[in-house]
Amino acid sequence: MKENNGFGKQHDSSTGLRLKTGLAEMLKGGVIMDVMNVAQARIAEEAGAVAVMALERVPAMIRAEGGVARMASPRLIKEIMEVCTIPVMAKARIGHFAEAQVLQSLGVDFIDESEVLTPADEQHHIDKHAFTTPFVCGAKNLGEALRRISEGAAMIRTKGEPGTGDVVHAVTHMRTIVREIKALTALRGDELYAAAKNLQAPYELVRMVAEAGKLPVPNFSAGGIATPADASLMMQLGAETIFVGSGIFMKEGGTPLDIEKNDEERKEAISRARAIVLATLHYDDPKIVAEASEAVIGSMKGLAAAAIEEKNLMQTRGW
Amino acid sequence: MTPPSPAIGVLALQGAFEVHARRLAELGADASLVRKPGQLAALDALVIPGGESTTFLKHLERAGFYGVLNEFVHSKPVFGTCAGCILLAREVTNPHQSSLGALDIAVERNAYGRQNDSTILSAETALPGGPLEMVFIRSPRITRISDSIQVLAKRGDSPVLVRQGQILASTFHPELSHDPRVHQLFLNIVRSAMP
């Protein structure tokens, strides 16, 4: 099967998928940071982020301000690509394949089909096989992860509850995915057909997971991770890389730290970014996580996920 | 009598360390992940994997890691892939950044473009056994080599697999292919350097 991205370049689909998961492999053990401007992107790269996610508003601001959240302006994305040597990711709305086409044409390195933005399709996710650019998608459980992989996702991340600074749902989702994978490995071969039915996922993928004991693509974590200890927790639960959204550049509610004019707030952002990178690398060494936590000045105020009404949760977007 | 398994560390600051360690273990090495400078002393050799070289440098600045690693790469067998090759080079451009300088080459980062320009090629190399699959991901380009460098594979006119004594480096990712020949070559280098 050939795929054509419309730019005169073709890969057969297995080659394409290997290149996509290959880049995900290079991002393992690192931190991917949300950035809203060039100044934040510079701080992220300087702190040791393995990639940045370029977006107009971080989840905490979207939550505070409301309205329709869309793909970032191509102007912003290009500016950030211009100053970063590390990979640049950007978000498209769930099902909005035209936004994804735009992002691919800009040359971003990874597209996040994200529940953080307002969904554009209530039924269909993007057919990600049709793109050369790799995709990452969120998942709350194994069935959802495998549905996204069958659509062509090259990386899965837990959804968590974005923009809250409350790690509780990222924990729930990671534990669920890991537990469901373990359960599959204990099944007899002839039991996998019913397992696939129950997971609402393709049998072939279910069989692969049962045999390998892990997802066929890297499994990262996102959604509410705000402190070095949060990063350590998610890595110990099985995450291979950490996404940090609002946790680095936000102070209270929808207000970002002023890193351009206020030197104290700039130092605060740098201290948080560095500390999360350090704690992600040495996640299994509590002494270093303690050292990283101690170096942090201030923290995002956060919003308890339990206080959010069901209809305002972002994680229930997508299926 | 079987020779002792060489102890080969894989620098695991971040990146594709797992796949390297798995491949080395399959080939009979005693592979381990290295996250702290103190772990280097017990090793016969080291692999510096792909990942983000800027991130590696940030981690190496801590806890005297850079100095210890610098000493290691100038005295023991080392294999660097992609970001690892960048770290070993004498000179790095696009942008300029510091490097260990153990391998007398100049490297340009992200020289072939972004992820959409990543590609898998197959070509004859100096390694026996037919064409070698080479996976290039946001790959750097070796732009200059000294006379002491042996070129083992090329992409167009640019070297992509090079050797200088006991140092081996590739701009592609042999750990992402099934073909074990490049890792096998490194193991041979390591074994012949062992007392």
Image (tube, coloured by chain):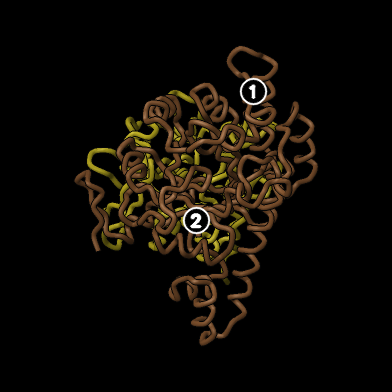
Question: In the orientation shown, which residue stands out farthest toward the bottom?
Answer: A190
As helix, strand or loop, the secondary structure at mark 1 comes to: loop
Indicate the position of residue A251 as horizontal and vertical percent values: 68, 27
Upstream in sequence: badge 2 or badge 1: 1
Judge by depth and name the residue closer to the eye, A268 or B58: A268
Inter-mark Cα distance, 2 to 1: 31 Å
Q: Is residue A154 left or right of residue A237?
A: left
Quarter of the view holding residue B64: top right
> Which residue corresponds to the image point at 75% horizontal and 27% vertical from the top-left?
A298
The residue that disc 2 covers is A318
Q: Amino acid at mark 2?
A: Gly
Q: Residue at x 41, y 56 (%)?
A: A125
Q: Chain of mark 1?
A: A
Q: Is residue A62 visible?
A: yes
Q: Which residue is mark 1?
A: A257
- Image coordinates for residue A204, horizontal then vertical, percent: 43, 74
Which chain does the residue under circle 2 lie in?
A
Specify the chain shown as brown. A
Name chain B's colour.
yellow
- Looking at the image, residue A124 sits to the left or right of residue A13; the answer is right
User: Neighbour class for label 1 at 10 Å: few (<14), some, many (≥20)?
Assistant: many
Q: Residue at x 42, y 43 (%)?
A: A92
Q: Nearer the viewer, residue A272 or A173?
A: A173
Identity of the amino acid at label 1? Answer: Leu
Q: Are marks 2 and 1 on the same chain?
A: yes
Asked if residue A44 lies left or right of residue B125, the reply is right
Measured from the top left, where is residue A91 in percent x and y?
A: 45, 41
